[in-house]
C-alpha cells in the first residue's frame, strides 16, 4: 500500500536526482571519460572545490533535511575530501521562518491556548533554523525563550530519509568499498541524529545534564528549561540575551577581556569532553553569546554528543602526546580510538605528523595550532580511507570550530598552552605518567621472563631440527587478491598457448579446409580478451602508495 509519505518520497527522489544530476554526470565521467566508455580522468583540487560549491547550493535548495545532512557530512573527513569538508563547513542553518499561524497550531497542540500558557507572546521569531524557530514570551513574570518545531517537518524529514536510503546504491557506484561502508553507517546515524534533534524532550534532558555539570561555574550561563511549558515539540527556557561572541567591537566596548573569554570557552569544552562525557556539539558563533558581565551564554543543545570513558582516556593521551611532540604517542592514540588503521604505514604517518607540527609550530614550541594538526589528520583519514566514529568526528569538528572562535577573540590564542594547563590542573599529566610507568614495569617483567623461557624453547626447537622433525606453518594473507589474479593469468596464458598451438596444428594438417582452425581460433579469442583485461584492470598486481611525502608536498603546493 502506497502511503502519503511514500508518495512524497517518490516525488522528492525525483527532485533530488534532478538537483544532483550535474554531479552524477561529473562523477560518471571520472570513471569513464565519455560516461559509458573511455579511460578515467584525474580530478584536481580545483575541480573538487567547484563541485563542492555545486553540492552546497543543491543542499540549500533541497531544504531542512539536506542542510542537516550537509552539516553532518562536514564532520566526516573519512567520507569526503578536504575540499568538500571546507566548503560544507560554511553551511548555515538559517532558513525563512514559518508563518506564525502554523507555529501557533504546534504550540497549542502541545500546551493549549497561547494566551493561557503564557502571560505574553511575541509572534515574531528572534531566530529561525531548519527544524525549528525561537520566539520570546513572558511566563510568571519572567522573560522566556520558546523553541517551536516547524509545522509538518516530521513528514518532510521522514520522506527525505527514505530518499537518502534509496540514493545509496547510486552513490556507492562512485566511491570505494571502505567509504561505501562509512556511508551506510552515516545514513543510519543521520536518521537517528535528526530524529533526536526534533525531540525537544531529549534536548531538555541534555540541557539539564550539562547545566548541572556547570552549576558552580560562574564564568558561563546555560538557560534553565521550564518543564511545565515544554514538550516533544516545544521547549521553553530562561531567556538570556547577550552579544554574539564574534562581535569583537561590541565586546571591547564592554571592556571584557577577550583572551579570558577564549580561555574560558576552551576549558568548558575540555571539561565537557574529557570529564563529563556529554557536550554541546554546535558551538558556532550563533549559538554563543556574552553577557554584560563577561559570562559566556550557550544556546541550542539540539545537537549534542556523548563520549565513552575509553575514548575520553585516549583523547587525553592524544592531547598529552601533542603537547610533548610525541609522534608515536599521537599515532598510538589515533589507532586505539579507531581513527587510524593499525595497518597504516607508521613511518609515513610519522612524517605527516612531523610536517604538521613543524608547519604549525613557530620558534616557540607552544605556538602551533591544533586545528592545523587536525586538518592534516583529516586529510590523511580521507586518503587511506578510514572509518571515523560519529562522536569522535563531532569531537574533531567541535575542536576546530571552538579553536576558530577562540582565535577570533584573540589572534594569538594558544590552544595547546590552555589544554596543557587544564590537563595538569586536573591531574591527567600525572595519571598518564603513572600509566607509562606501569607499562614500563610490565615490559621489564615480560622481558625478564623471556630471558629464562626463550633459551629453553630455542633448545627444544634446535633438537627438533636435528631430528628433522620440525614443521613450519606459513599463512599468507592476500587481502587484495594478488595471488588469485596471478593464478588466473597463468591459467589464461596456458589456455592461450593451447589455443594457439591447436589452431596451428589444425591448419597445418588440413590446409584445404580452414574451418577447424578458424573454430579453434574463435574459441581462443575470449581467452585473449580475458588475459588482456586482467592486465588492464586498475586492480592489478602493481600498487601505488596513496600517501607519500612527495604527494603531501604536491598537495601543500596546490594549497
Image (cartoon, rainbow, N blue to C red):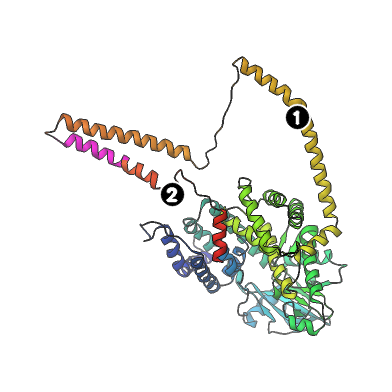
Q: Quadrant of residue 209?
A: bottom right
Residue 519 within the magenta-colored segment of the rendering: yes
Residue 9 as seen in the image, left or right of residue 148: left
Q: Can see residue 155? A: no
Start-end of magenta stretch? 513-527
Q: Which mark is residue 450?
A: 1
Q: Is residue 228 above or below residue 426?
A: below
Label 2 CA crowd tier, 10 Å (few <14, some 14–19, many 20+):
few
- Residue drawn at (79%, 73%), measured in percent from left and top? 259
Instruction: Give whichever of 31, 135 is nearer the camera.
Output: 31
Q: Which mark is residue 538?
A: 2
Q: Is residue 472 above or below residue 200?
A: above
Residue 427 as seen in the image, left or right of residue 458: right
Marks 2/1 in contact by CB < 8 Å: the verdict is no
**How many numbered tags mark residues here?**
2
> What is the x, y in percent for residue 372?
66, 63
Amino acid at each position: 500500500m502506497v502511503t502519503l509519505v511514500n508518495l512524497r518520497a517518490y516525488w522528492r527522489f525525483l527532485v533530488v536526482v534532478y538537483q544532483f544530476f550535474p554531479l552524477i554526470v561529473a562523477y560518471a565521467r571520472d570513471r569513464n571519460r565519455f560516461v559509458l566508455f573511455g579511460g578515467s580522468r584525474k580530478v584536481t583540487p580545483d575541480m573538487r572545490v567547484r563541485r563542492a560549491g555545486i553540492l552546497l547550493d543543491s543542499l540549500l535548495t533541497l531544504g531542512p533535511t539536506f542542510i542537516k545532512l550537509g552539516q553532518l557530512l562536514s564532520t566526516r573527513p573519512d567520507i569526503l575530501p578536504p575540499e568538500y569538508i571546507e566548503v560544507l563547513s560554511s553551511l548555515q542553518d538559517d532558513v525563512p521562518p514559518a508563518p506564525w499561524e502554523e507555529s501557533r497550531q504546534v504550540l497549542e497542540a502541545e500546551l493549549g491556548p497561547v494566551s493561557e500558557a503564557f502571560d505574553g507572546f511575541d509572534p515574531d521569531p528572534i531566530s529561525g533554523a531548519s527544524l525549528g524557530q525561537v520566539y520570546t514570551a513572558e511566563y510568571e513574570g519572567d522573560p522566556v525563550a520558546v523553541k517551536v518545531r516547524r509545522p509538518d517537518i516530521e513528514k518532510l524529514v521522514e520522506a527525505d530519509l527514505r530518499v537518502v536510503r534509496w540514493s545509496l546504491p547510486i552513490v556507492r557506484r562512485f566511491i570505494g568499498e571502505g567509504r561505501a561502508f562509512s556511508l551506510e553507517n552515516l545514513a543510519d546515524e543521520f536518521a537517528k541524529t535528526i530524529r533526536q534533534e526534533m525531540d525537544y524532550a531529549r534536548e531538555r534532558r541534555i540541557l539539564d545534564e550539562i547545566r548541572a555539570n556547570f552549576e558552580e561555574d560562574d564564568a558561563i550561563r546555560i538557560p534553565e528549561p521550564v518543564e511545565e511549558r515544554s514538550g516533544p515539540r516545544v521547549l521553553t527556557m530562561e531567556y538570556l540575551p547577550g552579544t554574539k561572541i564574534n562581535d569583537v567591537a561590541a565586546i571591547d566596548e564592554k571592556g571584557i577581556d577577550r583572551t579570558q573569554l577564549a580561555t574560558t570557552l576552551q576549558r568548558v569544552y575540555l571539561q565537557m569532553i574529557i570529564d563529563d562525557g556529554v557536550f554541546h556539539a554546535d558551538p558556532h558563533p550563533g549559538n554563543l553569546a556574552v553577557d554584560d558581565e563577561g559570562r559566556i551564554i550557550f544556546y541550542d543543545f539540539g545537537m549534542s554528543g556523548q563520549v565513552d570513558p575509553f575514548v575520553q582516556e585516549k583523547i587525553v593521551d592524544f592531547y598529552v602526546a601533542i603537547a610533548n611532540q610525541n609522534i608515536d604517542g599521537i599515532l598510538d592514540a589515533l589507532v586505539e580510538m579507531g581513527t587510524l588503521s593499525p595497518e597504516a604505514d607508521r613511518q609515513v604517518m610519522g612524517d605527516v605528523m612531523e610536517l604538521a607540527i613543524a608547519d604549525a609550530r613557530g620558534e616557540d614550541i607552544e605556538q602551533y595550532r591544533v586545528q592545523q594538526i587536525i586538518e592534516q589528520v583529516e586529510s590523511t583519514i580521507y586518503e587511506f580511507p578510514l572509518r571515523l566514529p560519529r562522536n569522535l568526528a563531532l569531537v574533531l569538528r567541535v575542536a576546530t570550530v571552538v579553536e576558530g572562535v577562540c582565535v577570533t577573540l584573540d589572534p594569538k590564542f594558544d590552544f595547546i598552552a590552555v589544554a596543557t594547563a587544564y590537563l595538569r590542573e586536573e591531574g591527567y599529566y600525572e595519571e598518564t605518567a603513572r600509566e607509562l610507568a606501569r607499562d614500563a614495569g610490565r615490559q621489564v617483567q615480560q622481558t625478564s621472563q623471556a630471558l629464562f623461557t626463550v633459551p629453553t624453547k630455542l633448545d627444544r626447537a634446535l633438537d627438533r631440527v636435528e631430528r628433522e622433525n620440525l614443521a613450519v606453518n606459513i599463512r599468507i594473507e592476500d587481502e587484495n587478491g594478488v595471488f588469485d589474479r596471478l593464478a588466473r593469468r597463468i591459467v589464461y596464458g596456458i589456455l592461450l598457448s593451447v589455443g594457439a598451438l591447436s589452431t596451428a596444428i589444425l591448419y597445418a594438417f588440413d590446409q584445404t579446409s580452414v574451418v577447424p582452425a578458424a573454430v579453434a581460433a574463435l574459441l581462443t579469442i575470449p581467452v585473449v580478451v580475458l588475459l588482456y583485461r586482467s592486465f588492464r584492470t586498475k586492480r592489478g598486481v602493481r600498487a601505488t602508495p596513496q600517501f607519500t611525502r612527495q604527494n603531501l608536498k604536491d598537495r601543500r603546493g596546490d594549497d
